[in-house]
Image (cartoon, helix red, strand yellow):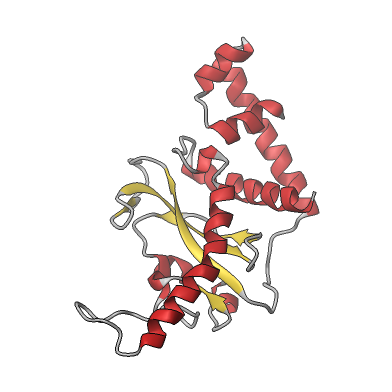
Amino acid sequence: MILALEFWRTNAAQAVLAKFYRVHQSTISRTITLVTRVLAAELERIDPPVTSVPDTALIVDGTLVPTGNRRNVEGTRSGHRRRHGMNVHVVSDLAGRILTASDPLPGGTSDLTAFRTWSLASQLDQDQTLADKAYQGSGMLTPYKKPARKDFHDPDMRVFNTQLAAVRSAVERCIAHLKNWKILATGYRGRITDLPRLLALLVRLERLRLTW
């Protein structure tokens, strides 16, 4: 368990961990795989998947889990973020406590398009859910769009955008805490098909940390 937590927290290469623990790299790999499977199942038992969201103000934001360029996965290049990875949506409350996260989609998918494929999108797509300008055109509360090369015609629009950004900073803190698990921040090297289970596991560990 300690080995797996250290691996997820630091994203150290398995070869480095093998030298530190004085075992073969294959032992490190098998151990991490086993712990991931067992811990994911146990955490899912005590913290079931979120199928409905509370009727309260929530915040949605997208983030990229960097993966590098994968030959067997198309569309991972994010033009906006200028790197390859998987697009993930995170939901938090106004205090920055994580509620859930979506399954990853290729990073080349726009935030709004990726969001709309999520099973929770219909529940979140409403005016009490806060989001950034990438979600403009949805039913969520987003900033006013500034006219090209012009200022807002109504000063209150600028004030609104500033206030909305201040409230939305809670989800950015939430994502920063989640990405303290460096495997989600500095370059995921595992199989892409294994990423959804790992992401769900780490989200549940964050939820557990906040309620411990």
Q: Residue at x 72, y 40 (%)?
A: 39
Q: Is residue 164 visible?
A: yes
- Measuring from the top left, give residue 197's x and y in whole percent: 60, 47
102 shown above or below 142? above
Q: How many marks?
A: 0
Residue nearest the viewer, comparing 102 with 176 = 176
Considering depth in this image, is 207 or 38 the residue closer to the camera?
207
Does 51 appear above or below 30?
below
- Point 51% across, 18% down: residue: 15
Q: Residue furthest top?
A: 22
Q: Residue at x 59, y 44 (%)?
A: 198
Left or right: 115 in relation to 158:
right
Measured along the vertical axis of the image, is residue 120 above or below residue 181? below
For the question of whether residue 119 can be seen, the reply is: no
Q: Residue at x 60, y 77 (%)?
A: 123
Looking at the image, the residue that sits furthest to the bottom is 154
Q: Quadrant of the N terminus?
A: top right
